[in-house]
Amino acid sequence: MIKEGSIVKAKAGRDKDGLFVVVRLEGQYAYIANGKRRKVESPKKKKLIHLQHTNGYANTYNTNREIKNIIKEFGGL
């Protein structure tokens, strides 16, 4: 189940196969950021059906640097 702080993989679109952190949920949409191209200040709005849940979770994801480090440790970027 995808929730705020989950590390997800994009299944469709320009960001396909990229890893992201879910920074906010609204209904059937998730707002995702990777700290590099998709910043915390302006996350990408993506439908939940286009995201694949991973077993990763971010406890803190307030800054772009934190998100980049989380994804790097998880195996992305």
Image: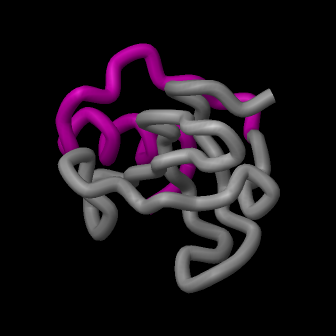
The quadrant where residue 66 appears: top left
Q: Image quadrant for the C terminus?
A: bottom left
Residue found 74% across the figure and 39% down from its top: 54
State the residue in front, 25 or 11: 25
What is the image's colouring?
A: one colour
Q: Would residue 74 be counted in the magenta stretch?
A: yes
Residue found 81% across the figure and 57% down from its top: 49
Horizontal side of residue 39 vs 75, given as left or right: left
Q: Position of residue 30 (x, y in %)?
A: 57, 46
Task: Reply above or below: 62 against 43.
Answer: above
Q: Position of residue 48 (x, y in %)?
A: 72, 51
Residue found 26% across the figure and 46% down from its top: 40
State the residue in front, 75 or 26: 26
Q: Position of residue 1 (x, y in %)?
A: 81, 28
The quadrant where residue 19 appears: bottom right
Task: Reply above or below: 65 against 58.
Answer: below
Residue farthest to the front?
27
Residue farthest to the top?
59
Task: Reply above or below: 77 against 26.
Answer: below
Residue farthest to the bottom?
14
Q: Position of residue 58 (x, y in %)?
A: 48, 24
Q: Would residue 10 be counted in the magenta stretch?
A: no
Horizontal side of residue 2 vs 41, given as left or right: right
Horizontal side of residue 15 vs 68, given as left or right: right
Q: Which residues are magenta?
A: 54-77
Residue found 64% across the figure and 30% down from its top: 56
